[in-house]
Amino acid sequence: MKPYKPISLKKLHHSLSMELDKEIKDIKKDSISFFASTPTPLSNEALNKNKFTPSINEHRAITSLLLQEYLSVSMADILVDLQVILSQENTIKIRSALERLKNHEPIQYILEKAHFFGEEYIVNKNTLIPRPETEELIKIIIDDFIKKRNHYEKDLNILDIGTGSGCIAIALYKEISKYYKDVKVDAIDICKDALQVAKANARNLKADIQFHNIDILNEGLSHKHWDIIVSNPPYVRYSEKSNMAPNVLLYEPSKALFVSDLDPLIFYNSISDFCTKNLTPSGIVYLEVNEHLADEVAGIFTHVSRALLNKHYSNSNKKDFSNTIIKKDINSKNRFVIAKI
């Protein structure tokens, strides 16, 4: 058998990047970034202008991740043009991954990992890929419970509704545990397969999370109260589906993304009902929302009338939300609703 010859890592990187770039740009209707950071719908006007056509630099970034993963090299190795031996096994892996990328499969699913708040998480077809916007939500919570408060000797109870990969619950546990004496985190999800991923991430990242297989629309964790209840539930309406990126539509779990146009606030109504009974007296609810429905979501928490509460609940522990605000994300979109008892 002939020995494999060394090849230029820089030339290999360039060749793969150009091949991917040409393939994607040849399909105008699918001109969309592989790194689309949010499932928020894109306008037809934006798509028609090819505003989101991926750049060659983006494809270079994607292919560099493949090479780093499969050849155990660094970005610095690519830049200095390290000579590498490309085995048949690695050639097959790289070619297979490239074909999957051409079919719009997210690089995170191919590598089965994604980064969120400085940590590496396992992700697969059962979980959404963590978004930068959700990192912003974590920062907001940290600001409220660490930088603006002096409760370092107190306990704190947190609930994550619709945990998916577990990234929100785990990030909050790791960050807030640095400052609070005892942090207890519960996380729920309707999908058992997603919970298996979340549990693996918690083990890998040494986060003590209690996971529960629960459908928030039909049940909840009873006889317990939390200081923080956080959720990034499904919020994209089916009518917005046609304007979404193919990498999201084809691969990310639809149940974690979409809601009916007839009842797009179904999860927020359920969460509001649950929170009014299960938040501590000074508790806060943090929600990620569809930018087009932020006012409606805020309204659910702002206008919970006493008459309605009395009609459905005789128990005096039921609470109103006295202060509800909308916060924008880094792109100036109405992305977060925060409600306080």
Image (cartoon, grey):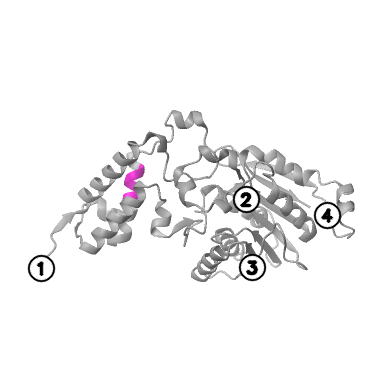
> Quick one: label 3 or label 1, which is nearer the N terminus?
1
> Quick one: label 2 or label 1, which is nearer the N terminus?
1
**Image x and y of residue 258, in percent:** 59, 47
> Quick one: label 1 or label 4, which is nearer the N terminus?
1
Q: Which image quarter: residue 198?
A: bottom right
> Quick one: label 4 or label 2, which is nearer the N terminus?
2
Q: Name the residue under label 4.
A: 319
324 vs 71, left or right, is: right
Q: Which mark is residue 1?
A: 1
Residues under labels 3 and 4: Cα distance? 25 Å
Q: Which image quarter: residue 20?
A: top left
333 vs 117, left or right, is: right
Closer to us: mark 3 or mark 2? 3
Secondary structure at badge 2 equals helix
Q: Which span is picked out in magenta?
A: 58-63
Residue 34, visible in the rendered structure? yes
Residues under labels 1 and 4: Cα distance? 76 Å
Q: Mark 2 points at which residue?
A: 140
Numbered circles on residues, count? 4
Residue type at tag 1: Met
Q: Which mark is residue 206?
A: none
- Whether pointer 3 and pointer 4 mark residues with C-beta atoms closer than 8 Å, the reply is no
Residue type at tag 3: His
**Image x and y of residue 168, in percent:** 58, 58
Residue type at tag 4: Lys
Quadrant including the N terminus: bottom left
